[in-house]
Amino acid sequence: MTRRWRLIAQVALLGALMFAFPSAGSAFSGAVVLLTPTGPSPAVLTIPAGMYPFWENHDQVTHTVTFANGLCSFQLAPGAYGQCDFPLLVGQYGYTIDGTIQASVIVNALPPTTVSLTARSHTLPKATHLRLHGALHPSTCCLPLPNVLSMPIVVLARHDRHHPFQRIAAVRSERRTPYGSGFAWRLNLHPKTTTIYIAEVTYQPEGEQGQRQAWSRPFKVIVRH
């Protein structure tokens, strides 16, 4: 029974910490490192980009957490918890406990954002409108909804493989797809000739420097005269 109540208390504390330390620009999620008499647990914490570590002192004495290169240093009294405020980019960050015990935080890159494009059919009678549609799948589940809905999806087109793709429109997601697996978008067109379409998204991955791009598979629509 004691162990059960201890677990409930730890879960409650984690929930409190998640609200106490929000990260800039994204919904916060965190992972706890426990400082124990035998050292930090875990000694090597592996987290995805967008998640932030914090430390809780489960020992009876004060401990000092110090990151290499002067990134961060703080003391934790028994029962206290703390966090560093430097940006966590993808990579490995070494730190020590009390200047002697070696530990680290490893930040892994998130899977790429994806975008899809399709239509009801590959063939279209002349003078009939075409509805392109697809879904945007962000690279993180914790990205705030306004950020996802504001991501522009650029639709490009070309008539054949001998011509470059040209931008024809930019749309935004409108709603979640069934089961919440992505965010749906659509675009109505009136093509006059056979055209190949592709969707493109440019985005800034959490925890990375520089932007990435994602493309859908090309979708060819044949206009019958």
Image: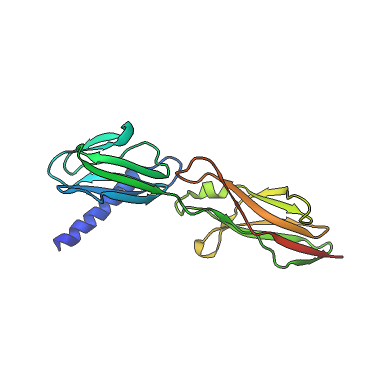
Please determine whether, in this image, residue 87 is positioned above or below residue 202: above
Q: Quadrant of the C terminus?
A: bottom right
The residue furthest left is 60
* Number of residue marks: 0
In the image, what residue occupies the spot 55% across and 43% down? Answer: 211
Q: Nearer the viewer, residue 149 or 198?
A: 198
In the image, what residue occupies the spot 60% across and 53% down? Answer: 173
Q: Is residue 84 left or right of residue 76?
A: right
Q: Nearer the viewer, residue 85 or 144?
A: 85
- Which color scheme is applied? rainbow
Residue 22 position in % (x across, y down): 38, 43
Residue 163 position in % (x across, y down): 78, 51
Q: Quadrant of residue 186?
A: bottom right
The residue furthest right is 225
Q: Quadrant of residue 178?
A: bottom right
Q: Quadrant of the N terminus?
A: bottom left
Residue 213 position in % (x across, y down): 59, 48
Residue 140 position in % (x across, y down): 47, 52
Q: Is residue 156 left or right of residue 208?
A: right
